[in-house]
Image (cartoon, rainbow, N blue to C red):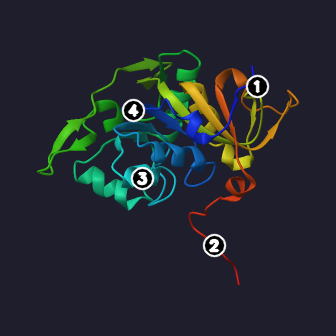
Amino acid sequence: MDKVVSSAAEAVADLGDGASIAVGGFGLCGVPFTLIDAVYAAGASELSIVSNNCGTIGLGLGRLLDAGRITRARGSYVGENKELARRYLGGEIELELMPQGTLSEKLRAGGCGIPAFYTPAGVGTLVAEGGLPWRYGPDGEVAVASPSKEVREFGGREYVLEESITTDFALVRAVRGDRHGNLVFHRSARNFNPLCAMAARTAVAEVEELVDALDPDEVHLPGIFVQRVVALTPEQAADKPIEKRTVTE
């Protein structure tokens, strides 16, 4: 039951070309930088990424994006990465945007074995009606568009059917973890991390502090959802870039 591996490189050694990966983080908060760097170093390409956003230029998933390693991305926010916008509008990447709560539930439901669910988010918009541009062609025309989705009425209100998400791998970051894969997250760094781990067949967690065991009442994500644990060095644990530094005089 000891899930600790010796390095990030070893933890992602079987993550190859064409893999689908759910990646935790919100902006640059709670991002598994060390594991992403290991995937970058290993050279995996044609990746399908599920994450709230795609990092920033040169940081987090932005490293893989800048290198042209990502062919498809699913998320809910792209505003801080001009390179993602450029590649999307230029037809270099397929991008599926969705409401943030829908993304959360797609991952959670996928991890719970629920294939689909109904939600009111997106009813009456292109999310439900179809036609959202997923990929542009070289001529700037829409090459791939989202399909229409089933809409049903429950209790006098309309809901759209959304399919759940599962992935080959997940990369997540926790503040503490034990050898069984139980994880604790720090405040807002928790964000999408537990949901991404739940949705993956192989979840890899980098932890700032590795302990032999955690108090069960502390655990945010049970080890049943985590297959591999990597203990960060003090330097790696302290490396937490700030997306927008704000100071007061």
Q: What residue type is labelled 1?
A: His
Q: Distance between the residues labelled 2 and 3?
A: 21 Å
- Nearer mark to the viewer, of 4 and 2: 2
Q: In this view, does 238 lie above or below 71?
A: below
In the image, what residue occupies the spot 70% across and 26% down?
3
- Nearer mark to the viewer, of 3 and 4: 3
According to the picture, the residue beneath numbered tag 1 turns out to be 180
Query: Quarter holding the N terminus?
Result: top right
In the image, what residue occupies the spot 46% across and 42% down?
42
Q: How far apart are marks 3 and 4 (CA)?
A: 22 Å
According to the picture, the residue beneath numbered tag 4 turns out to be 123
Q: Earlier in the sequence, mark 1 or mark 3?
A: 3
Q: What element carries label 4?
A: loop
Q: What element carries label 2?
A: loop
Count neighbours of disc 1 (C-alpha within 10 A) and say few if under 14, some if 14 to 19, many if 20 or more: many
In the image, what residue occupies the spot 47% across and 23% down?
164
Q: Which of marks 1 and 4 is nearer the N terminus?
A: 4
Q: Which of marks 4 and 2 is nearer the N terminus?
A: 4
According to the picture, the residue beneath numbered tag 3 turns out to be 78
Q: What element carries label 3?
A: loop
Q: What element carries label 1?
A: loop
Furthest residue toward bottom: 249
Give the image location of residue 195, x and y in percent. Answer: 60, 32
Give the image location of residue 6, x and y in percent. Answer: 67, 37
- Nearer mark to the viewer, of 2 and 1: 1
Q: Do the residues labelled 1 and 3 touch (CB within 8 Å)?
A: no
Q: Earlier in the sequence, mark 2 or mark 1?
A: 1
- Nearer mark to the viewer, of 1 and 4: 1
Give the image location of residue 99, x and y in percent. Answer: 46, 40
Query: For residue 24, what is the image quadrant?
Result: top right
Q: How far apart are marks 4 and 2 (CA)?
A: 37 Å
According to the picture, the residue beneath numbered tag 2 turns out to be 246
